[in-house]
Image (cartoon, rainbow, N blue to C red):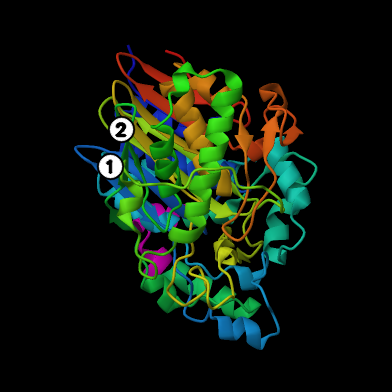
Amino acid sequence: MNRKSAASSHFLSTKAGLDMLDMGGNAYDAAIATSAALTVVQPNLNGLGGDFFAILDDSDVKAINGNGFAAELATIDFFESIGLSEIPKRGHLSSFSVPGLVSSWSVLLKNTSLPSAKLFEPAVKYARDGFRVTPSIVRSIRLTKEADEDWNSIYSSVAQGGTLYQKELGATLEKVASDGGHSFYHGNIARLIENDMVKKGGLIRFDDLDRYEAAVVEPLHARYRGSDVYTNPPSSQGATALMWLNMLNRHQLSKMEKRPYYDTLISTMMSAYAYRAKYIADPAWLPFDHSLLSPQYDYNEGIIQAKTGPSISDTTAFSVFDGEVGISAIQSNYMGFGSGHNIGGTGINMNNRGCYFTLDRNHHNALAPRKKTLHTLMATLAKGERTIYLSSMGGDVQPQINVQVLCNVIDRGMGIQSAIAYPRFCYPASIYGKSELFYEKDLQLGSGKEVVNLNSMMGHAQGIVVSDNVETGIDPRGDGLIRYD
């Protein structure tokens, strides 16, 4: 029996990871191959200019927080001086958060077994030889209205479909493969990023890149129904899921009928999100109160009325398992293609993660140089009778997707594929306001706003469950692939 597996939201990136495993590579090899391929085949969801978070299940459990900080020039005074009361969501003034993905690859590369060039080979091939774009990419291209000429020169040709070529991105990936990402932060690529920023009025400079390094950190942890659940610490929003699971531990979900089951999930979720808005930020600016994760913490549970508009973002997630080591990971440029700011000559799409900051000086997520915004990316690992590697795109709703899938597996006894495909609800509120509650039609909640089944606003989750067998789950809401051996 093959106990190796890879799961991602695009069939070509899944194939890249599986190929590394078939060559005798380990989970780290598969993770880099999958991650690099995703930057090519899902440019609307992530890229070299974006961030990366992961949970590593090796001899012990570790986390990678690969989110960048705001550039030195990104200040509230600057935005106010040009007459802005909020940070733009697109364009060169939204692209000031230093990318963390490539630095995260440097962390993973320390444990790989195959040659670096081999790991990036599929991504380079997809970039140079091209691939047929999916309907989701076409839709994202058509929706991207505020992009620069470098971006348009790459993507406008496939706005109606066809084969996408990203030759400059392929060359950049080859350079990253050759030096482990050093040039991206300390060499020629960093200089190209700075030069493009200066030319277009952006805010990142060489020194911002040169100072950055992804962090390997202790994960957050909570117990749920006999399983140890791990996720990324702040500035990731992962603690939201653990607080929510602590509340759910006090309810016997497995014995509930549908109506009380979902009433309980939604009311406790609302409470967890209220805590998220108050207590999670860059820990250098707002230290996280770990007592919030105590099983005895006296949470204020109760439904909070949902009123205002949703916060929307796009992300891509994957999991890999080599028979011994497992990795759950997620990466993103934030909103669609990110800022729409493409670094000329490199194929790099810069993220717009910095627009999650506020210019309200009194808010704990107020913009400041070298500060990290509250980050929506999170990955999940649950270790009990079964080991579950899980992550999902979805922006602000990622804790909701992770918890709903975990409850489907742990409380309702579903297999991981059924648990992921099962209808979901979502509450896409940012930390600054509230939202309507949405649910997929077949869930038949009866309260909230009904949307079509398999709706992407419910995220694209990917997961692997390991017990006597290895089971893989791919979200039908995405473009993933499962290989059955």
Q: Taking the image as drawn, is residue 8 in sight?
A: no
Residues rendered magenta in the picture: 173-186
Q: Is residue 182 above or below residue 123?
A: below
Q: Amino acid at mark 2?
A: Gly
| Percent position of residue 164, x then y | 67, 44
Q: Tell which of 149 and 64 is nearer to you.
A: 64
Q: Quadrant of residue 359?
A: bottom right
In the rendered image, the quadrant that contains the C terminus is top left
Q: Tell which of 133 and 52 is nearer to you.
A: 52
Tag 1 residue: 112
Q: Residue at x 44, y 46 (%)?
A: 378
The overriding secondary structure of the stretch rendered in magenta is helix
Q: Tell which of 280 and 318 is nearer to you.
A: 280
Marks 1/2: CA distance? 8 Å
For marks 1 and 2, the one nearer the N-term is 2
| Percent position of residue 410, x then y | 41, 23
Q: Is residue 428 above or below residue 341?
A: above
In the rendered image, the quadrant that contains the N terminus is top left
Residue furthest to the left in view is: 59
Q: Amino acid at mark 1?
A: Thr
At label 2, counting other C-alpha atoms closer than 10 Å, the crowd grade (few under 14, some 14-19, many 20 or more) is: some
Q: Would you say 266 lies left or right of 408 here?
A: right
Helix, strand or loop under label 2: loop
Helix, strand or loop under label 1: loop
Q: Would you say 49 lies left or right of 311 here?
A: left
| Percent position of residue 342, x then y | 62, 63
Q: Assess whether residue 329 is covered by the magenta stretch.
A: no
Tag 2 residue: 25
Q: Mark 2 and mark 1 in contact (Cβ < 8 Å)?
A: yes
Q: Residue at x 48, y 60 (%)?
A: 278
Q: Assess whether residue 183 is covered by the magenta stretch.
A: yes
Q: Taking the image as drawn, is residue 237 in sight?
A: yes
